[in-house]
Structures are given as structure tokens and as C-alpha cells.
Image (cartoon, rainbow, N blue to C red):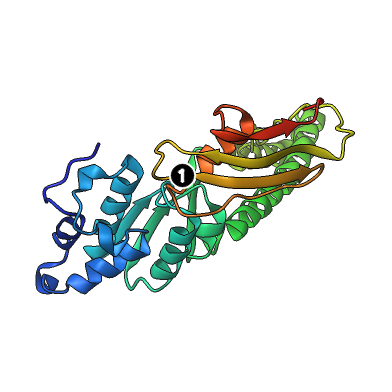
Amino acid sequence: NLEFSHDTILTEAISALPEAEKEHHWKAEKILAGLGFKQTEFQRHPQEFSGGYQVRLNLAKALIADPDLLLLDEPTNFLDIISIRWIERFLQNWPHEVMLITHDRSFMDKLVTHTMGIHRHKVRKIEGDTAKYYDQIALDEEVYEKTRMKDTRRRKEIEQFITRFRAKARQANLVQSRIKTLQKMGKKQRLEKLKILDFSFSSSPFQGRHLFSAQNVNFSYDTEKPLARDFKITVAAGERICVVGPNGKGKSTLLKLLAGELTPDTGRIKYHPAV
């Protein structure tokens, strides 16, 4: 668990307010709510929350502090889709500079004015989003390769001239001039082919109509707080389903139930024999 200095979520958040805004508690409350904290949770101790929500609290404090330069390292890692949409809107209106590290290109492209990346052991900074960044790199490398091939042909022509006329005294000055030209040209190296992550999932063709169905599934860790009640679903071949919702509402538990890692309290999950 992370360490905190105050006894409640709200007082911990308020502690990050700039000195001139110490009475602006509403600002802390607004940002906490945007990051998924309920008002009924504001008076709870930070250590009562999961690690993910403790990270959210630290993120809230960074936003509340209103720094001139905001440094964010994977800010969406512990956020649900609702909180991600909120912080997108919040940062779009951020009045200061931001440096952002994230693997979420969609999130990044909605916020940035410039993209900086490490390419071929060098840092490149390009105005625009990630698509423009990669387009510019591709264009630069295409130009480099065309220039390299042109230089290679030119070098070969000069070398052939030197070989042909080196022994002829009348061409001595021209030969020396070509030698100096070669020395000044330098030699561009062929760009090394970059390795990329490439993988595929191997599977046999599925011939059935339905992969599985769940009927009247009930499950809870605590009998007073059921996570699934009379849950029903049938998944057909070819379907792709996204499970969305706030953190802590049972999404991961649901998938564990459907995967057979957890056993329902009541109800049945039936799989096709080929699954």
C-alpha cells in the first residue's frame, strides 16, 4: 500500500491544493468525483481502499496541485472507462504544459500537440499526434534510403573512374579530385531492419453455433453483496463482447466465472464440447 499523511480521502486531496487555494475544497471534491470516488467515500481512510484507488488518489493530488509542468506516467492504468473519459476532458482544458507516457494511443492522440519517441537509439520530437509521428519517420527513412542508393551509385561511378584513369598522367588532377570527393562523401549505412512484436493465436475452426451459455448464475464473496444475480448470457460463434463498467463492480469476477476459475453459488454454465 502507498503511504498517506491524512485520515480521510478528502483531507489528503485538499493537502495538495496550492497555498493560495487552500480554501477551495470544491476543487478537490470535483477531481475526486471525476476519478471515481463517491461523496460517501470522502471521509474514509485512504488505507481502506485498494491499491488501484490509492493510485487514483495520488493522481487526483497531482491534478489538484495545478503544477506548471504535469508529468504523467501511464495515468489510465488503474482507471475505468468512465474515469478515462473524464480525465481526457480535464486534460484537454489543462492550461499548462503536460508530458505524458502512455501505451493508450487513442488517449494520447486526443491530448497531445507534439509526440516524442525513441527511434533507432535517438529521441525524435514531431509536431502532431502519433500517426503523424510514425508517418514522418517512415517518410524520413524513405528519403534516407533513396539518398543512400543514389550515393552508392555515385560512389561506384567515381571508383570506376579512379580505377580506369589512375595510371594516366594526363588525368592525375581529375583522379585526385575524385579521390577527395569520395573522402568528403562519407558512406551511408543501410538501415537495420527493426524487429517488431509479431504473434498469432493458433486455434482450430469452430463449427458450432454457440460457444457457451450461462443460466441463472448467482455468485458472491459476501452473501450480503451479491456480484452476480440470475445472470444469463449466450455467446454465439464470431461474437466479440466488451465488458464495461466502474472498477470494483465484478467485471473480473464475471470473466473468472465464465472461464471456470470460480464456481457459481447457483446456476449453470454450459460450454460447447469443442471449447
Q: Nearer the viewer, residue 121 or 158?
A: 121
> In the picture provided, is 241 more to the left or to the right than 38?
right
Q: Nearer the viewer, residue 165 or 201?
A: 201
Q: Give x and y (percent) for residue 259.
A: 62, 31
- Report whether residue 194 is seen: no
Q: Helix or strand or loop: what does disc 1 sit on?
A: loop
Q: Quadrant of the C terminus?
A: top right
Q: Quadrant of the N terminus?
A: top left
Q: Give x and y (percent) for residue 114.
A: 48, 62
Q: Nearer the viewer, residue 119 or 199?
A: 199
Q: Nearer the viewer, residue 201 or 26?
A: 26
Residue lying at 52% horizontally and 65% vertically, measured from the top left: 110
Q: Amino acid at mark 1?
A: Pro
Residue lying at 41% horizontally and 39% vertically, measured from the top left: 223
- Report whether residue 81 is seen: yes
View extreme (right): residue = 207
Q: Give x and y (percent) for residue 160.
A: 80, 33
> In the picture provided, is 255 more to the left or to the right than 162?
left
Please say if 251 is above or below 168. Answer: below
**Which residue lies under the disc numbered 1?**
226
Please say if 173 is above or below 262. Answer: below
Q: Residues within 10 Å of mark 1 (few under 14, many from 20)?
A: few
Q: How many marks?
A: 1
Quadrant of the image occupied by residue 71: bottom left
Q: Give x and y (percent) for residue 25.
A: 17, 71
> In the picture provided, is 226 more to the left or to the right than 129?
left
Residue lying at 48% horizontally and 44% vertically, measured from the top left: 227
